[in-house]
Amino acid sequence: MRDWTGHLVVLGLGASGVAVAEWGLSRAADGVRVTVIDSADNDVVVARAERLRAMGAEVCLGCERVTAGDLVVASPGIRPGSALIASARALGVPLISEMELAYRLSEATWVAITGTNGKTTTTALVTHLLREAGMVAEPAGNIGPAAVGVACELGDAGIVVAEVSSFQMVFADTFHPRVAALLNITPDHIDYHGSLEAYAAEKAKVFARQVPGDTAVIDIDDPGSAAYADPVEARGITVRRVSRTERPAGGAYLVGSTLVIEEHGEEHALLDVSSLGIRGDHNVSNALAGAACARAAGASIEAIAAGLASFRPIEHRLEPAGIVNGVEYFNDSKATNPDAVLKALTAFGDRPLVVLLGGRNKGVDHHPLAHAVAARTADVVVFGEAADEFLEAFGSLDVRPVRASGLADAVERARGLATPGSIVLLSPGCTSYDEFSGYEERGRRFKEIVASFGDAR
């Protein structure tokens, strides 16, 4: 693939699309021609298009059709059923994702992390554990640099640790991670995939090309992911089961409050849950999965234990955002679906909690989430496009959420509800695209608002 030449067509001017276009343009002297197509024409897209045109790309904005090309690389945000994808398929040329292209270009070993929730934290953790073990490891995908850039820079001695979304697996046909983890499967992106079953099938494709000698790490506490453990193992792949409630042979689990990896009948203690720098039951599961992945990739038990102790929360995932007048604020903007919020609700024991919910829904029923939130706290603020949906979901419950006009108003109203010793938690359960460009901008704006209160520390 590194020697490929021809007409490269890139669909979408998101971060991954730009990275693919830049890769193609870097090989213009070898005969690679680059065309970039995006159906949008907003300010961000226009700015990116102008830069790529200056570099030599042909760019068509507002276009809904591909008319020519030898290789089409689709950005993950483009729906498989769109007119743009249909026209690309009609060309009869390879149609792949940016992650698939990166894999084809790479000489490194790949570790892939997928699941509805916990991908980013676990990807960052695995990278941290491998580096603690003295290995050359780089994160890629949703978590950091586009996978194409990492793949081209990392040699055969390195390890790519990739956060893999269901979108990226839709157009992946040779992707073969030597270690692959499935953390959980809960309803999400139904508007994109059409059904939970189709969404789950794309997630499970992370194991599709694995062979005996490879390792699959699967959380068996989650019914959605647990269903794949036996079928994957039946293919001769080593399955490392992860659990907080069971003790699976050859897996990673808890003995009391101690994280353990079991190998050949021997339990290797890692550290106590209280020594983890990341909060919540879900992060105990993420830590166990991360430890199992790192071990499968060659890290020592000692390095894993040290790395688990030194790892700290990453931005937008239950990230401390400050303390104001005795109230702690936490930025969990990455919680863009109900299951992520459910996990966040477990992170603070029984401390008083004010929860901020809102944004743009992704076709998910919010009634189960409303019941769970109401069982935990009566202090809820809703905002954004989904505010009315949340109000309806809470309608039959004793909790009466406060409605806010947007994030800034929501934080101000939450401040009014909070008392010293309580937690204000931004864990929206929705995407941010009604008000922001992404969950990152939403999370950073939340932190700015908290900092503006004056005595945040």
Image: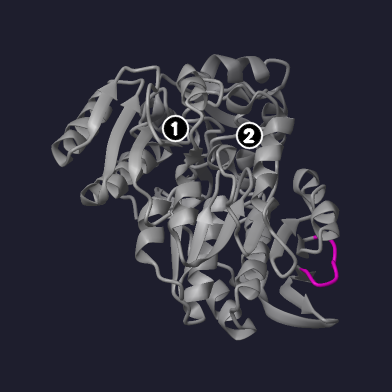
Left or right: 49, with 391 as reference point: left
Q: Secondary structure at mark 2?
A: helix
Q: Residue at x 39, y 23 (%)?
A: 66
Q: Position of residue 372 (x, y in %)?
A: 71, 34
Q: Amino acid at mark 2?
A: Pro
Q: Amino acid at mark 1?
A: Gly
Residue under circle 2?
Answer: 338
Most prominent secondary structure in the magenta stretch?
A: loop
Q: Residue furthest left?
A: 54
Q: Which numbered mark, 2 or 1, is in the foreground of this view? A: 2
Q: Position of residue 21 (x, y in %)?
A: 30, 42
**What span is colored magenta in the figure?**
245-251
Residue situated in front as seen by the camera: 160 or 256:
160
Question: Spatial distance from mark 2 to mark 1, Cα to Cα?
Answer: 25 Å
Q: Quadrant of the N terminus?
A: bottom left
Q: Which mark is residue 416?
A: 1
Q: Secondary structure at mark 1?
A: helix
